[in-house]
Image: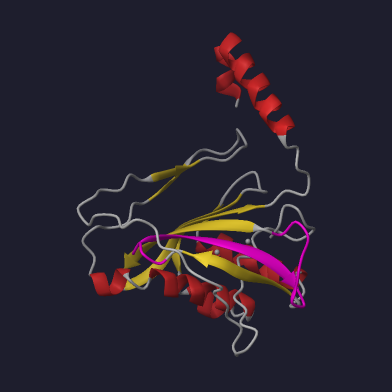
Amino acid sequence: MNSIVASPFPSHSLPIFIHKNSSPPLLISRSFTSPPIPRSSSYSPLRVSSSSSDNSPVTVPSPPTDAPLDILRSASQIVRDFYHGINRRDLTSVEALIAENCVYEDLIFSRPFVGRKDILLFFKKFNDSISKDLQFVIDDISTEDSSALGILWHLEWKGKEFPFSKGCSFYRLVDVDGKKQIIYARDSVEPAFKPGELALTAIRGVTWLLEQFPQLADRI
C-alpha cells in the first residue's frame, strides 16, 4: 500500500497507473515475468524488523500453497486495483484490498506500518499532502507468480518525469475468506544523494569494525 525519499513527497505514494490514451488512468508500459514457483514449495514467514532498536520484529504470515489457482492468479489485478484506488483517493475501495494484519514498509521510515488501520491512516495523510498532478507510472510489473509480485515505477508531474523519482515495490498477497488481499508491501526509492563508490568505502569500513568488535552487531 508509498513517497519518494529523494523528493519532498513520502515514498508511500504507491505507483498510480496512467494511460495517456484512455480513461481511467492506468498504464503498464511493459511487463516481465518471474520464474514460476512450484506449487509444492513451502514459504517461510517474513520477519520485518525496523531500523529502530525500540521496535521488535514483525512476522508476516506465509501465503497458503493450497488455494485455488483461479483466486491466486488475480494477484497483479488486485495490486492494480489498489493503486487505482489510491490514485482516485478512494480509500474505501482500497480498504478491502488490504489484509487486516498487513505490514507495509517504506524504507524512508524507521519502522513499518502494521495493520490495515495504520496503513489507511498513512494513505489518508499522503493523499491530503500530495497534488493530483504528481502521479506514478509503472515501468514493469511481474505477472507470473500468483502470490507475490514486483513493480518498477517512476513519478511524473503533469506527464513529465519528476527528478529522483525512480522506485521499486514488492507485494505479497494471500487468500482471505476467498478474497485476494495484500499481506505485505515494501517500497524502495531512488535517493537524491548518490554516493557512488563512497558507499562501498562506507560498507567496507563498517564491516571492518564489526570484524574487530563483534559485540557492536548487537547495537545495529
- In the rendered view, would you say 170 is above or below 107? below
Q: Judge from the rendering whether residue 83 lies leftward or rightward of residue 79; answer left or right.
A: right
Residue 25 among magenta residues: no
Q: As rendered, which of 196 and 42 lies closer to the eye?
A: 196
Q: Which picture quadrant has residue 51?
A: top right
Q: Which picture quadrant has residue 88?
A: bottom right
- Where residue 90 sits in the image (x, y, percent)? 59, 80
Q: Is residue 112 visible?
A: yes
Residue at the (43%, 70%) spot, across then down? 76
- Which colour style is shown? secondary structure
- Where residue 108 sits in the image (x, y, percent)? 67, 48
- Where residue 120 sits in the image (x, y, percent)? 58, 67
- In the rendered view, would you say 37 is above or below 123? above
Q: Residue furthest top?
A: 212
Q: Is residue 177 visible?
A: no
Q: Judge from the rendering whether residue 112 lies leftward or rightward of residue 197; answer left or right.
A: left
Residue at the (61%, 64%) spot, across then down? 153
| Numbered-mark total | 0
Q: Judge from the rendering whether residue 1 lies leftward or rightward of residue 10; answer left or right.
A: left
Residue at the (63%, 88%) spot, across then down? 21
Q: In which quadrant will I find the C terminus?
A: top right
Q: As rendered, which of 118 and 10 lies closer to the eye?
A: 10
Q: Which picture quadrant has residue 119?
A: bottom right
- Where residue 188 sits in the image (x, y, percent)? 61, 52
Residue 155 among magenta residues: yes
Q: In which quadrant will I find the N terminus?
A: bottom right
Give the magenta part as a residue range. 143-165
